[in-house]
Amino acid sequence: MAAVPSPAPQLTCDDLLQLRPSLQAYLERFRPLFPRRDQGASFRAYAEGLLSGERRKSVERMVLRELDGDMNQVRRLQYFAADSPWCDQPFLERHWQAVGAELGTREGVLLVDTTDMPKQGVHSVGVARQYCGRLGKVANCQAGVFVAYAGEGGATLVHRRLFLTEAWTGDAAYAERRQRCGVPAEAAFRTKPQLALELLTELVAAGSLPARWVVCDEGYGRSVDFLDGVAALGLGYLAEVPVDTRLWPERPPTVVPRTRPRLAPGAPASLEARTLAAQLPAAAWRRRRVREGSRGPEYADFAIRRVVASRDGRPGPDIWLVLRRPPGSDQVRVFLGHAPRRVRPAQLARLTGTRWAIETCFQEGKQLLGLGAYEGRSWQGWHRHMTLCLLLHFFLLQGKLGLKKNSPA
């Protein structure tokens, strides 16, 4: 069965205080990765600031709370995050090893999503007027592509990459800004699905996180290059797609000219997924459990069948079509799945309920760890800050699991 973690207890400020004594031991596993001893002290101060009860997790506020407002300490932590000579890639790799050891399962799920961070001004790296999911409109914000791992016992964030708009990567008017923010010269424009596929490729190559599935929303599911890239990595996927996605209920006849196969004369046209859903008889639908919610099991009605995907108007691979609607409703959500014919329908149904886990990671990261609060301006500083937030989110997850084990039934 696919790994669908059940909810762990919500952490309070009092819980965070209880976890603080164990923080030093957790940080010690990463301290040897710094080239200089003083960087370890800054690492601990920064981590303690992120775990503090301070709502605004800027360096100034963290220092005011943790280090008596010493401005020298403000400059030291700002330098540590943005400019101090250390590489965060080894920290990510050790993080993946720890997550794999704690949560790893053959049915592990890699969850892909974007989170947006509203910003004022135009000087922070990657900031642009673009759609901001947090605000539900076009606004000034940064956008980050993230991957979380859901395994035995919970889910945690494992990888990250800042999204840069085409203007940021190619417009001559942004040249000075790119240089000032330290954007690598080789940073070319990548769509969010392209960035996500690069992150997944790195995780698969590292081999620390056993995974069978990738789950994503429409923003990634509508990219056939992303879906085919995931399949090429040897992973299954369950991707939400628009209701007007076209497919064939059965493989149509084709002819093979010199280039690629094309539809034979008189072959049936592809159908929109919503059209196929409307044609299904009532007997095709079955109520299944989606996930364990905080208030008990959650259910939805599903119709699951094998179909043929469309690639540029031509028949593509055989895939699973998963149609989901709330009990008593005709509002259908559509998912496409790359999985063997022998996969159990109940497994595909439960996979549709895993995306909540990365949303929970984002919520905890922003509310408890300052995931969206980095106020520096550099490319390197943004990625380092996010790396430290990833490490600390896993620390919180371990604390939550400990609280869950120790709480009365």
Image (spheres, helix red, strand yellow):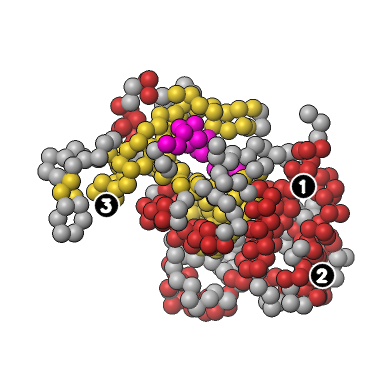
Residue located beneath label 2 in the image: 41
| Residue at x 21%, y 56% (from the top left corner) | 260
Q: Nearer the viewer, mark 2 or mark 1?
A: 1
Q: Are marks 2 and 1 in contact (CB under 8 Å)?
A: no
The amino acid sitting under disc 3 is: Asp
On-image quarter of the N terminus:
top right
Q: Residues within 10 Å of mark 2 (few under 14, many from 20)?
A: few
The image quadrant that residue 272 belongs to is top left
Q: CA distance from mark 2 to mark 3?
A: 55 Å
| Residue at x 55%, y 50% (from the top left corner) | 211
Q: Is residue 33 left or right of residue 358?
A: right
Give how far across and how far down residue 293 sits, in percent. 63, 32
- Secondary structure type for disc 3: loop
- Secondary structure type for disc 2: helix
Frontmost residue, 2 versus 216:
2
Give how far across and how far down residue 128 sits, in percent. 51, 63
- Residue 382 visible? The answer is no
Frontmost residue, 374 versus 230:
230
Per the picture, the main secondary structure of the magenta-coloured stretch is helix
Residue located beneath label 1 in the image: 399
Which residues fall within the magenta stretch?
342-361
Residue located beneath label 3 in the image: 312
